[in-house]
Amino acid sequence: MPKLLFATILADITKNIGITTNIVAPINNITHPQLVNLLIQLYYGYMSWQFFISVSVVAGSISVLLQRLLLHRDKSNTFAYIVVFQALVALLVGTYAVINGFVMPDFGKYWLAITATCVLFGAGNVVYAKTLERVEASIFSVLFATGAVWVMLMGIIFLDEALSARQIIGSILIFFSIAVLGYSKKSLKFSKGILLGLLTGFIYGLAVALWAYVGRGSDVASWTAISFAGPSLVVLIAYPRSVKHMKSFLSGAKLIRMALLGVTFSIGAVTLLTAYNKGNVSAVAPINQTSIVITTLLAIIFLKERDHLPKKILSAIVCFVGALLIAF
């Protein structure tokens, strides 16, 4: 009786907020799996894009810290890390997608964008990892934010979008924040890590734009799983010798950190794409930029990245303001 009453109430709620359920059995014969499925549909139909982008920002910031630990402190092999990490996220998200009905993207429509996304993410992950080996997480978040500038330029070049004075100012502020990081003893010097970080922002800016484009017309979980499996395969084919270094991720602290990274990054990726699907890009993108400040603060607190603290905080704030100007 309690289950019947609960299920009836849920069915009425989903009907009122416009969610179409796939429960075909009479409500009095509803099974436990059907009830769980109804709860999932209610959850995703009712939660707003603000909730999903908030979860994504926090999960993404935590992921950067875990990646810094794996790549810098644990001295993990770059290519083995990429293959294992990307494959793990693909497995976790893919399992969720299969349970809820895996749907392949429309390859006839998106084949070029899908191929380019996998190749760009494959190359981007290599540069991404090399950057985190050399620079602190608090600095990386600022460098990575330059991707917003390249996405903006893609829209201007390929979509004939207008360039506003606000966007120009935002772009200047972002690169000024990089200059703040590179300024030392009355001279401007950019280390190899900073240059790699700028390249990472460029590659990821292109990849994320294509990823969101395909995601708009695809099942969120299914496309997310494919977008992680593809780059893992690309890197494995390019660096087959990375296989012999994968055993190190199967035990000890590396296993725990990799498992946590897989879960947090999976949550961050799915919730980000869900937020883009539920809300307008112009509204979602600015909130996503708060990860710049959150990552910096978390790195200062938990990784004790406190060298040149005023410079890092100033750079993060300036970069955040610049990203907001571009996104709005």
Image: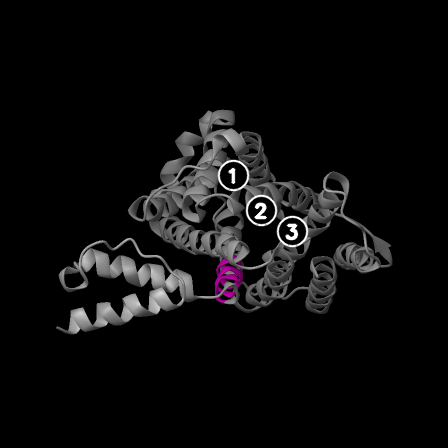
Position above or below: 81 against 295: above
Q: Nearest the camera: 21 or 244?
A: 21
Q: Are marks 2 and 1 in contact (CB under 8 Å)?
A: yes
Residue 56 is one of the magenta-drawn residues: yes
Residue at the (39%, 43%) spot, across then down:
88
Residue at the (81%, 51%) spot, across then down:
163
- Give the residue furthest to the right: 186
> Is the C terminus in the top left, top right, bottom left or bottom right quadrant?
bottom right
Q: What is the CA distance from the residue labelled 2 to the residue labelled 3?
A: 14 Å
- Colour pattern: one colour
**What residue would you read off at disc 1?**
78
Q: What is the CA distance from the residue labelled 2 to the residue labelled 1?
A: 9 Å
Counting residues from the start of the chain, the first of labels 1 and 3 encountered is 1
Chain part drawn in magenta: 51-60
* Residue 321: image location, x then y, percent: 73, 65
Residue at the (56%, 63%) spot, across then down:
299
**Residue type highlighted by circle 1:** Thr
**What residue would you read off at disc 2?**
133
Find numbered disc 3 in the image and state the secondary structure of the residue it sits on.
helix
Mark 1 vs mark 3: in front? 3
